[in-house]
Amino acid sequence: MPSPRTAPKAAVLAAAAIVLIAPTAAHGSLRSRLASKMRPAGPASGAYVYNATKGRAVFRWREKRARILASNTKLFTTAAALARYGPQGTLGTEVLGNGVRAPDGVYNGSLYLRGGGDPTFGSRRFVRGNYGSGATVETLAARIQQAGITSVTGRIYGDESRFDSLRGGPDSGYGTSIWVGPLSALSFNRGLANSSGSAFQTKPALTAAKRLQAALGRRGVIVGQSARRGRTPAGATVIARVDSPPMSRLIRLTNKPSDNFFAEMLLKDLALQATGRGTTPRGARIAARFARGLGSRVRMVDGSGLSRADRASPYRVARLLLAMLGRQDLADYYASLSRAGREGTLVRRMRRGPARGNCRGKTGTLTGVSALSGYCRARSGDMYAFSILMNRVSVSAARRLQDGIAQAIAGVRG
C-alpha cells in the first residue's frame, strides 16, 4: 500500500501504464481476429492493415508478396490520372476546320471531329441515362451553329489519331474485349452499336462523325458529303469544343462501378497528356512511376486489372493509399471509392455492422481472385488503410472473409 505522499505518483504511473497497454491490447485482439479471417484464404493470399492516425501497422499477413490485383489496379490508374490532370481537369472533343465561312454561313471545306479521349462523349440520351451529364454530340452541333455555320460543302471526318489504333488491352490481345468495348480517342456511347449493348461499333470514329452530321441535320445545318474517318490537317483551327466532366467525377465513374472501359481510357489519357499520343503501355509506365514516387510499387500492363500480369503486394497497395491521405486531392480520391453497404460495388456487402458507411474500398474480381483495399474509420475515430489480396480462392468465400476483416477494423473502439 503506497503512503499518502507516494499515492498520486503511483496513480499517475498506473494511468500511464493503462494508456500504453490498452491500445496494444486492442490491437492485439484485432490481430488475432484478423488472423483467424486470413487463415482459411490459403497461402496465395495476403493482407496489410495500418492505423494511419496512430502511425503504425497493426496487421501483417504475407504482406510483401505480390499478388494478382484484379480491379484493385484501378486504384493506381485513377490516382495517377487525378494527379496528372488535377480534380478540375477535363478531356475535350473538338471540331476543327481549315476552310472558309462565307458571309451567308456556308462553310467551304470540311470539318474534323477530333477526339481527346473522353469516355463520356455520346448522345444526350445516352450520356444523361448513364452518367447524368457529360459531353454530347447535340451540344457540339449547337456550338457549330452558334459559330455562324449554316451548311458545309465538304464532309465531316472522324479523327481518333490521339490514341493508337489498338482497341483493347493485353488480356484480349489488344483487340476489342467484351469486358471493355472498343477503345478510341473518339469514342461515342462507349463504343456500343445499339441501345441494348448487345454489339460493339467496329469503326468508332466513323460512328461519331455520322452522329455529328445527323445532329447538325436536325438543326438545319446540311453537310454536303457523307462522313468518313480522317486525320485533322495541320493548321486547322478550332470551331467548337465540348468538355468531359472534371477528373474528380471521371474517377468516381471509374472506381465506384469498377468500370473497365473508363479505366482503360484514362490510362491512355495519361500517355496522351504526357506525350501527345495515348497508348496503354505508356500509360501503364506513367501510372507505375507515379506510384513509385509515393513509395509504392506496382507492375501494370493495363488500367483496369483485367490482365493477371497486374500485380502488387498488399503492403504496396496500402502504401499508395496512405500516401494519398497526405495529398491535397485526397477528398476526390476518397470519394471515388465505394461505401460499404451503401453504393458502388459494395452496395450489397456489409449492409449491417460498424463497416456500413464507415469503410470505403475498391473491389477486384477475376476467376479465382478477389481483392478489397481501401479505408475504414473505426469506432475509435482512427483512420485505417488496408489491403486484402486473395489469389487461388473461391470468390464468394473470399468476400465473406474480407467483409469480416473490414467489420473488425471498423469496430475497433480503442
Image (cartoon, grey):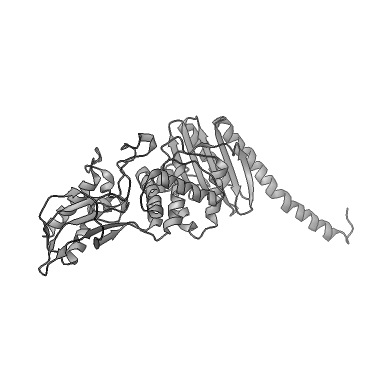
Lateral position of residue 122 relative to residue 53, left or right: left
Identity of the residue furthest to the front in this view: 234
Q: Which residue is rendered at x = 24% and y = 38% of the image?
A: 199
Image location of residue 285, percent across then percent down: 46, 46
Inspect this view and state whether residue 263 appears. Answer: yes
Vertical order, 54 against 46 (above or below):
below
Inspect this view and state whether residue 377 appears. Answer: no
Q: Count the marks: how many?
A: 0
Image location of residue 59, percent across then percent down: 62, 42
Of 285 and 330, nearer the camera is 285
Q: Quadrant of residue 47?
A: top right
Q: Which residue is rendered at x = 46% and y = 43% of the image?
A: 73
Vertical order, 25 against 219 (above or below):
above
Image location of residue 377, percent across then percent down: 55, 52
Image location of residue 383, percent across then percent down: 57, 52
Q: Which residue is rendered at x = 24% and y = 47% of the image?
A: 205
Lateral position of residue 134 relative to residue 15, left or right: left
Vertical order, 260 against 269 (above or below):
above
Lateral position of residue 55 relative to residue 1, left or right: left
Q: Which residue is rendered at x = 43% and y = 53% of the image?
A: 81
Of 17 and 157, nearer the camera is 157
Q: Quadrant of residue 240?
A: bottom left
Identity of the residue furthest to the bottom in this view: 103
